[in-house]
Image (cartoon, helix red, strand yellow):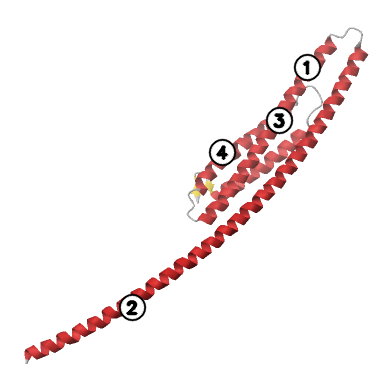
């Protein structure tokens, strides 16, 4: 099955590569989040690149969604539907994580500016101001560590739920395949019975034709004599 950007398999492979690159970029952003006031230029470029990749993945999901719906075979169609849904869910999860990262950066920059203003207004009590700054920095680091642990726990829970969902889908697929096999067997038996009835009718037609031919020949011979 082909679309404007290639076959469904090719588009799926491209989307998976973009997912891996986006996930790697987001992890680099999380671990290199600066403790300073401003975000570095490299981090800004990386954040923009990750956002661009996620947008491209979602565009590919739209194209794949159009392609899998045109597949004639239902088992293949269901398989590709699950694959495309998985890519779309992962892309949405990455976008949400990137949004959280950007919000944290904005908050960090705002707090850094407020601290800079506080330091600028200090008049001889710089030691006290620096102590406040250190306490805030430690508190922020503690909050960031707690937030990371919560996100890890949330990611683990999502992975478990995804695994359970996948097992349920596989069971549903096996059930549908079993029903398809039973339906196929039923159809085959009906076709065989229909063929047998047709053969019997053909036999009667053949014998009746032969009988009529003999009667016609006998009548013709008697008429000639």
Report the residue marked by disc 1. Answer: 113
Q: Quadrant of the C terminus?
A: bottom left
Query: Would you identify the image quadrant in which residue 86 lies?
Result: top right
Of the two numbered discs 1 and 2 in the rendering, the one whose residue sits closer to the viewer: 2
The answer for how far apart the CA atoms under marks 3 and 1 are is: 20 Å
Expressed as whole percent of the image width and height from the top left, the position of residue 171 reads 62, 56
Mark 1 secondary-structure assignment: helix
Q: Residue at x 61, y 48 (%)?
A: 13
The answer for how far apart the CA atoms under marks 3 and 4 are is: 22 Å
Expressed as whole percent of the image width and height from the top left, the position of residue 192 reads 42, 72
Report the residue marked by disc 3. Answer: 100
Report the residue marked by disc 4. Answer: 59
* 22 up-or-down from 126: above or below: below
Of the two numbered discs 3 and 1 in the rendering, the one whose residue sits closer to the viewer: 3
Expressed as whole percent of the image width and height from the top left, the position of residue 49 reads 66, 33
Mark 4 secondary-structure assignment: helix
Proximity of marks 1 and 4: CB atoms separated by less than 8 Å: no
Q: Residue at x 89, y 14 (%)?
A: 129
The answer for how far apart the CA atoms under marks 1 and 4 are is: 38 Å
Report the residue marked by disc 2. Answer: 200
* 61 up-or-down from 203: above or below: above
Between 156 and 178, the one nearer to me in the picture: 178
Q: Give the side of residue 190 with respect to residue 146, left or right.
A: left
Q: Residue at x 61, y 52 (%)?
A: 169
Q: Earlier in the sequence, mark 3 or mark 4?
A: 4
């Amino acid at each position: 099955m082909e679309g404007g950007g290639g076959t469904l398999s090719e588009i799926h492979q491209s989307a998976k590569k973009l997912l891996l690159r986006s996930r790697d970029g987001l992890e680099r952003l999380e671990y290199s989040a600066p403790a300073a006031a401003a975000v570095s230029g490299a981090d800004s470029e990386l954040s923009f690149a990750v956002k661009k990749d996620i947008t491209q993945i979602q565009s590919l999901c739209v194209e794949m969604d159009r392609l899998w719906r045109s597949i004639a075979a239902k088992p293949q169609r269901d398989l590709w539907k699950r694959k495309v849904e998985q890519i779309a869910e992962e892309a949405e999860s990455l976008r949400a994580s990137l949004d959280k990262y950007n919000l944290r950066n904005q908050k960090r920059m705002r707090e850094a500016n407020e601290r800079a203003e506080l330091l600028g207004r200090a008049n001889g009590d710089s030691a006290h101001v620096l102590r406040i700054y250190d306490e805030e920095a430690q508190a922020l680091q503690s909050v960031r560590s707690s937030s990371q642990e919560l996100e890890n726990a949330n990611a683990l829970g999502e992975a478990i739920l995804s695994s359970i969902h996948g097992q349920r889908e596989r069971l549903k697929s096996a059930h549908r395949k079993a029903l398809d096999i039973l339906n196929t067997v039923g159809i085959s038996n009906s076709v065989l019975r229909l063929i047998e009835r047709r053969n019997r009718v053909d036999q009667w037609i053949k014998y009746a034709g032969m009988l009529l031919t003999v009667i016609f020949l006998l009548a013709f011979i008697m008429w000639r004599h």
